[in-house]
Image: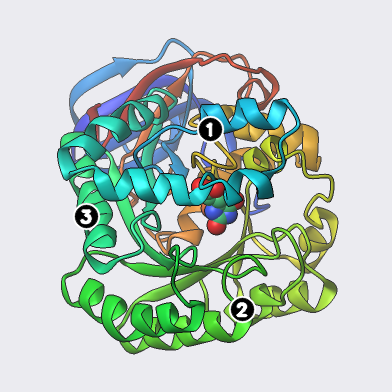
Amino acid sequence: MRCDTLWHDAQLITLDAADGGLGEIHDGVVAACDGRIVYAGPARDLPTTLDVARRIDCAGRWISPGLIDCHTHLVYAGNRANEFEQRLRGVSYADIARAGGGIVSTVRATRAADEDALIAASLPRLDAMLAEGVTTLEIKSGYGLTLDDERKQLRVARRLGELRDVEVVPTFLGAHAVPPGEDAQAYIDQVCMQMIPTVAAQGLAEAVDVFCETIAFSTAQAEQVFVAAKAHGLRVKIHAEQLSNQHGAALAARHGALSADHIEHLDAEGIAAMAAAGTVAVLLPGAFYFTRDTLAPPIQQLREAGVPLALATDSNPGTSPLTSPLLAMNMAATLFRMTVSECIAGFTREAARALGRQDRLGRLRAGFDCDLAIWDIEAPADLVYRMGFNPLHARVRHGRDA
Ligand code: DI6
Ligand code: FE
């Protein structure tokens, strides 16, 4: 059997153990051919028939699957640091919004920016993610809120994946906010009848997301979006139960959603619906931290029900200006009491599941894409424990140094 590259003298976090844990292997190797893993496991079990072209000595470093950020709003223009300062001086979020700030200010700036300006604004954020070992990330639209401006955001997301060695998964979030001066129902009709069909026909997104909340769209409107998305062959997901319990997660689960995200206010019925459907819970500790939320998602109940737990940065200018998956892991541990295994799995195996890529990404396993993060750490817990420190030694995408 041929092998282009063999990483040896490594310790592995395979995320491929029968017990669902980290799958640690101390004297491990990873072998790749044509961008795929052909073997990942103990050195002693490496097939002797392997014809190795290039050997990389990892000197005892740890190898995990490349990190996967399964929920971001990375593409936008403008800056809301001024709003943050206002809030520190005691101005309320509602007052800022009434004065033309908040999400509407990002919509204004994003509409005014052309594709190149959006690329220039987004690349440093993407590069910060890549510097921490991200090899796949989801990017949502949702700051355009017109067909052309949403398509522009999605095209920029795609171009980012061409400019850098990273897999970008585009999601259409036209139903993010009611555009200024428009009627919510009239806008949702437009999302369903005009935008979703066009976005689907042009192959600009894989999935459709909706912000289901009192300040955004109702559960009935979310369902309308799901029906339209599915009719056009797109997967669905939801921002649900972030500020109140609208029963959006249960609705999404009944529609076969990939994930329900945020879910701080999720109730027992929602947990049961997600468990029954296999819907992934995407937890977003950065938004919880930045908005100084106090109600944590029901982690213990989700765990007991067997709902898969993914983690993401929610990178966005309003509620989570975060581009560090490692810090998000630390926040999930400190704020949500998630374990080290759950935090690492949340940015690898379970994030892949949230993107419908669990058969190809997020584990060190023969047949999977050879996307790796190689870390200068003593133990996996170091990835979660430290704050603001980046121990990445190398990033590998499709078997090549990236
Ligand atoms: N939930 C959030 O927390 C962000 N979007 C969403 O659906 C807020 C986005 C922003 O304020 O720009
Ligand atoms: Fe979000």
Q: Position of residue 185 (x, y in %)?
A: 49, 83
Front label number (1 vs 3) = 3
> Along the horizontal axis of the image, is 109 left or right of 275?
left
Q: Which element type, helix, strand or loop, lies under badge 1?
A: loop
Q: Is mark 2 within 8 Å of ligand 1?
A: no
Q: Is mark 1 within 8 Å of ligand 2?
A: no
User: Where is the C terminus found, in terms of image quarters?
Assistant: top left
**Sequence-wise first label, 1 or 3:** 3
> Along the horizontal axis of the image, is 26 left or right of 93?
left
Question: Which colouring convention does the figure follow?
Answer: rainbow
The residue sitting at 55% across, 45% down in the picture is: 312
Which amino acid, mark 2?
Answer: Ser
The residue sitting at 61% across, 34% down in the picture is: 328
Residue identified by numbered label 2: 218
Residue identified by numbered label 1: 322
Residue identified by numbered label 3: 152
Q: Position of residue 17 (x, y in %)?
A: 59, 48
Which amino acid, mark 1?
Answer: Leu
Instruction: State whether residue 207 is above or below residue 33.
Output: below
Give the spatial CA distance, label 1 vs label 3.
23 Å
Q: Which element type, helix, strand or loop, lies under badge 3?
A: helix
The residue sitting at 76% across, 65% down in the picture is: 244
286 or 338: which is nearer to us? 286
Give the spatial CA distance, label 2 vs label 3.
26 Å
